Image (cartoon, rainbow, N blue to C red):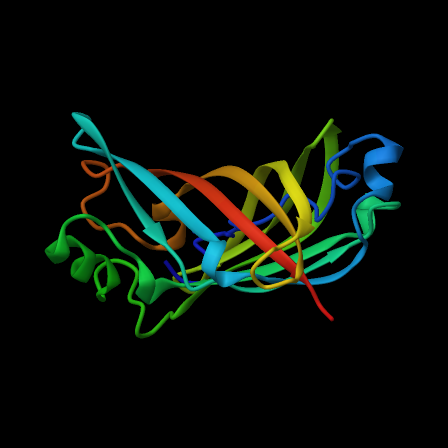
Amino acid sequence: MKRIFTTALGAALAIGAGSAALLGASAGEANAVQAGDYRVEPFHTQVLFSVSHFGLSNFSGVVTGASGALKLDPAHPANSKLDVSVDAATILTPVEKLTGELRGAEWLDSAKYPKATFVSTKVIPTGPEQATIEGDLTLHGVTRPLTLKAHFVGAGVNPITKGYTVGFDGEGVLKRTEFGVTKYAPMIGDTVHLTLHAAFELRR
């Protein structure tokens, strides 16, 4: 789906706030997380999606190919910003034929709309290690508001890359027909449930 499925489809998808402070954690925890400009760590960022299949079962897939940035200000969470994209052509399901169809012109049309992008407009701490992230999702050539519920996972130095990393999980819901993705709706569910797993590495 064009510019996130996100992240955010964005987010990662997106995502929470690059720190425990951004997510409403205590001052002590906030001081332990580094402020600064982060970039998406693409190998550990993905957007999972789930839709109803004829009302009989739920069916899931994944979108990867993430890129983008997180500006983190733990002391002033409202100043934090998230701008992330995923590659619509990376959409993958367990069914090879379906994967090809979803990438094609009748669904996401990834050749014409290669990216799905989520840009935050507001970060609202809602409790310890949690936040609501409001923003705009551009998907399949259409831009509409999307709200993500984010949860802080952890922060520290990645022992392999040696880069300082923060991680988040997030959830969101969208109506695909509002983005012009109407194939087989409503038999194949209009409501798309998103689950985001996102990692961000501090720029050196």
* 177 in relation to 55, above or below: below
Q: Nearer the viewer, residue 165 or 176?
A: 165
Residue positioned 81% across, 44% down in the render: 77
Q: How many marks?
A: 0
In terms of image quadrants, where is residue 158?
bottom right
Q: Residue furthest bottom?
A: 111
Viewer-proximal residue, 35 or 91? 35
Name the image quarter holding residue 56: top left
Left or right, 175 with reference to 125: left
Q: Residue furthest front?
A: 159
Q: Please provide percent x and percent y for residue 121.
A: 69, 51
Q: Position of residue 45 (x, y in %)?
A: 48, 54
Judge from the rendering whether residue 49 lies leftward or rightward of residue 169; answer left or right: left
Q: Is residue 64 above or below residue 170?
A: below
Q: Nearer the viewer, residue 15 or 201?
A: 201
Q: Is 54 located above or below residue 162 in the figure? A: above
Image x and y of residue 200, in percent = 62, 56
Q: Quadrant of the C terminus?
A: bottom right
Image height check: is 78 above or below 140?
Answer: above
Q: Looking at this view, is 199 or 78 the one in front?
A: 199
**Residue at x-position 31% and y-position 53%:** 181
Q: On the rendered structure, is 176 left or right of 121?
A: left
Give me the residue at 60% from left, 56% from top. 159
Which quadrant does the N terminus fall into?
A: bottom left
Instruction: Name the residue rendered at 21%, 39% in the picture.
Output: 188
